[in-house]
Structures are given as C-alpha cells and as structure tokens.
Amino acid sequence: MVLSEFKPCPGLTEFIRVYRLVHFVFADITNIPFKPYPPRAEHCLSFYPRDTETVEYVNSGQKITNLKTVLIGQQNEVSNRYVGKDFLVFQVVFRPGALYRLTGIPSYQLNNCYVDAETVFSKDIKEVNNKLNDAAGFKEMVAVVDMFLLKQINRGLKEFHRLDYVSDLILNAHTNLTIEWLAKESCLSVRQYERKFIERMGIAPRYFSKIVRFENAFRIKNKHPHLDWLSIAVQCNYHDYQHLAKDYKQFTNQTPTDFHLLDNSSPERKFGESDTY
C-alpha cells in the first residue's frame, strides 16, 4: 500500500500544489469498503492506469464509473468512491486558478463534477496512463506527468491574475482572512474579487474559506484521533464545537463523530493508514 505526495518540477510549481499517489492491492479482500470523500478546497486531474473507481454523489445520487482520466472540480458534498482490487491513482492537485488558466473553462462549470479529461485535453493524455503503468518507480511517474503538463502549458494559458496568488494564501492561513483584505491584495473591489474568484475557483471566496477550515478540522482529527472536538474547533478558528458541528452537518450531512466513524472503514484503514493529506 502506498499513500505518498511528491513535488512537481520547478517549471510547474506556479500551477501545481502537489502530486498525490495512492496504490492499494486488495489480494485477499472480496468486499472492498468504499471511501466517503468529503469536500476539499481543490481542483484535481486524476490518472487511473490500472483499476478505475466508481464515484457516487451522496446528495444527488449521480454515479460515474470507468473513466481513465478525470478532471475533478470544486466539490461541496460527499462522494462515495469504490475502487478495484489493484487501484492506482496519480492525482495532480492544482493551485488556485491554475485549472482555469490551463483549460479556459469557467470553474463554476466543474463544481461537483467528475469529467472525462480526454474531452478537455490533447490526445497525449491517453498515453499517460500507459506510461504510468509501465514506470519503473515513483520518480519516473512524476517525470511522465511533468512532461505532459509542461506540454499543455506550452500550448497556451489564460492570463495570470494576482487573485490566484492571494487565493493561495487562504489555504495556509492560520487566521480567518477577510474578503475586504483579500480583495485589496488582489487589486480589486470586493464585488470584482468575488466575481473573478467564482470564475477561477468555482465558488464564492467565503464558501471556499469555509471548506478550507472544515478540511483542516477533518485532517487534524485523522492525524490526532484522540484530540477532542472542542480542541480541534479552537485550533481551526471555529467559535466553539457547535460552530464546527454545523459545518460538518452542511458538508457531510452527519455529526463530526458519525462521519469519522464512517471514515474509519475506508480502504486505507485496512492497511493501518488514515486520510491526512
């Protein structure tokens, strides 16, 4: 079992936050548990060189299956993900605004979507999965994806906007940043900032910040399962436990404790790992 993160080459750090690689082989398990995947503040491109996954959105009931390359826009609901016995995913996690710059697609069109990437990118994308499957190791996998993305960038991009840099600050902020401050730092009025943020990130900036805070709480609980919820709430700048519980209810339809009990049955738990990235 592998659950690792890798940095892109220097020429891609403006666009890519991180590469994630997950590999499970369930040799002796017949009924593989599903992964309840909560909202995260990210846009991704995922490659599935071996078994693919089936994704079922909990609220809408929409089900997507058997795609080898997938664009994943901003999610704001839980999706249950069912994997095969030999499951390998290489995931590209974009920086804010980067997917919009790369594709020109307004990001709100990708919200809660799981899109066949072959319909968006050049035909070169079909070869990437084969190369990933045949790669001798992780470094070679990273090199394969680096090369593909560098080619896409060289084909042309939407313009950079300072908003993209400022929005990246939200992901690593230790305090709640005001919309007024973010707009000023982006050299925009609040109204302009909100409109352009939705175009490049898919959702309003306040809602994005809310997902970032929820995601941090989810990750901290998985890293430190014995921490009580009030301590986590305070650490993540919630007013109190009830404030945190309200966000969990909105994003997962469950209490914090109930959702993490469900997460405890995820595939990675079979290997003694937890979702902390």
Image: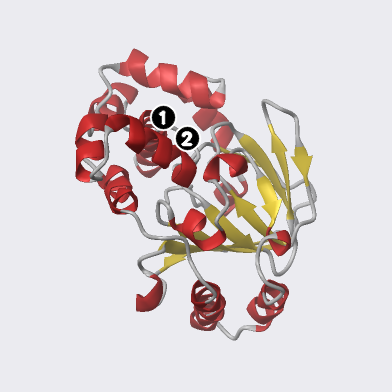
Horizontally, residue 95 falls left or right of residue 103, namely: left
Question: Which marked residue is nearer to the observer: mark 1 or mark 2?
Answer: 2
Q: Label 1, on which residue?
A: 207
Horizontally, residue 140 falls left or right of residue 8, namely: right
At label 1, the amino acid type is Tyr
Within-10-Å neighbours for mark 1: few <14, some 14–19, many 20+: few
Q: Position of residue 197 (x, y in %)?
A: 40, 40
- Verify CB contact (< 8 Å) between mark 1 and mark 2: yes
Q: Label 2, on which residue?
A: 203
At label 2, the amino acid type is Ile
Residue occupying the point 42% across, 32% down? 204
Residue occupying the point 68% across, 77% down? 124
Residue 11: name its quadrant. Answer: bottom left
Instruction: Name the secondary structure under disc 2.
Output: loop
Instruction: Name the secondary structure under disc 1.
Output: helix
Tell me the distance, in whole angstroms, between the alpha carbons under discs 1 and 2.
7 Å
Q: Nearer the viewer, residue 249 or 109?
A: 109
